[in-house]
């Protein structure tokens, strides 16, 4: 396993500047977020494709290991669906040329017919396979993936679909931590922060997730050997750079 950080940890900067900031904190691997609020926006990707590739290839201090395609899902019967697929296809091409294997997508919201979501995910997996990229579905509160059993059902119905496990979504605002052991075999990317039942993110050292058991027990037992990606929002009155460094040291101490 390797420790990485998401570009979302350092908002409002250009991609190269984010790379430099993360490298200054001794990160060597990065997850690049592609969404409307990130430094790489879906609608601009085709226009800046070569520039983004150049930055990824020439940055000697840090290397991309995953992409997070955070655009809100649309479905086959919606008029915006062709544009969604166009943007997603560009992201997959970017992953291919930068030699990144995993691209994460978001699930539909509850109430979306299960079969519609299966069809959409099958389309995405097909596009990913054409570019040699694994499509991975993010576990997330307020989405179909908020229940691990539903995640497992989607993976069984959509051959080749992986899971991006974010255990915070199974801790925060839950009566007890949800059991996600049944989906560990599908996990191909992991996003992490410190979390409690009351707060989605707290300072490093104040959360309830047992990182040692999670990394060296659950993930290792499932054969997971990819990135542990730090995904920290900026908290009021908290030095976010210090938190980034502390999370890296915590995770590296487990490897």
Image (cartoon, rainbow, N blue to C red):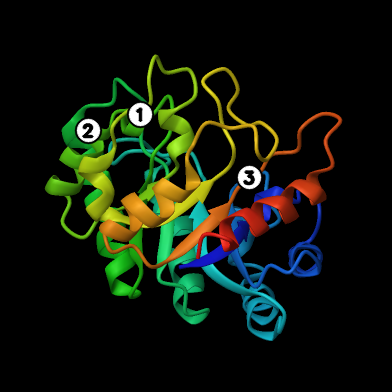
Q: Are marks 2 and 1 in contact (CB under 8 Å)?
A: yes
Instruction: State the CA–CA distance, disc 3 to disc 1.
Output: 23 Å
Mark 2 and mark 3 lie on one chain; the one further toward the N terminus is 3
Circle 1 residues within 10 Å: few <14, some 14–19, many ≥20: some
Instruction: State the CA–CA distance, disc 2 to disc 1.
Output: 8 Å
Q: Quadrant of residue 19?
A: bottom right
Mark 3 and mark 1 lie on one chain; the one further toward the N terminus is 3
Measuring from the top left, give residue 138's x and y in whole percent: 40, 44
Label 2, secondary structure: give it.
helix
Residue at numbered disc 3: 36
Q: Quadrant of residue 206?
A: top right
Q: Nearer the viewer, residue 106 or 5?
A: 5
Q: Nearer the viewer, residue 218 or 99?
A: 218
Q: Residue at x 33, y 22 (%)?
A: 110
Measuring from the top left, give residue 37's x and y in whole percent: 68, 44
Residue at numbered disc 1: 146
Q: Residue at x 66, y 31 (%)?
A: 202
Label 3, secondary structure: give it.
loop
Q: Are marks 2 and 3 in contact (CB under 8 Å)?
A: no
Residue at numbered disc 2: 150
């Amino acid at each position: 396993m390797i420790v990485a950080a998401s570009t979302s940890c350092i908002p409002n900067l250009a991609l190269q500047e984010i790379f430099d900031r993360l490298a200054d904190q001794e990160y060597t691997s990065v997850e690049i977020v592609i969404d409307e609020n990130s430094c790489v926006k879906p609608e601009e990707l085709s226009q800046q494709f070569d520039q983004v590739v150049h930055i990824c290839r020439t940055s000697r201090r840090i290397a991309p290991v995953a992409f997070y395609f955070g655009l809100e899902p649309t479905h086959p019967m919606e008029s915006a669906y062709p544009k969604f697929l166009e943007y997603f296809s560009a992201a997959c091409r970017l992953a291919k040329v930068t030699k990144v294997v995993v691209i994460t997508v978001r699930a539909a919201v509850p109430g979306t017919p299960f079969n519609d979501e299966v069809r959409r995910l099958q389309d995405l997996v097909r596009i990913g396979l054409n570019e040699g990229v694994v499509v991975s579905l993010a576990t997330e509160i307020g989405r179909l993936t908020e229940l691990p059993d539903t995640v497992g059902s989607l993976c069984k119905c959509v051959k080749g679909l992986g899971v991006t496990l974010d255990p915070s979504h199974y801790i925060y605002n839950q009566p007890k931590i949800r059991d996600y052991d049944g989906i560990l075999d599908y996990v191909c990317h992991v996003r992490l922060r410190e979390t409690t039942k009351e707060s989605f993110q707290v300072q490093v050292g104040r959360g309830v997730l047992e990182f040692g058991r999670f990394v060296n027990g659950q993930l290792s037992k499932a054969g997971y050997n990819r990135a542990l990606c730090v995904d920290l929002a900026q908290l009021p009155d908290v030095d976010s750079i210090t938190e980034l460094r502390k999370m890296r040291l915590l995770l590296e101490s487990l490897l």
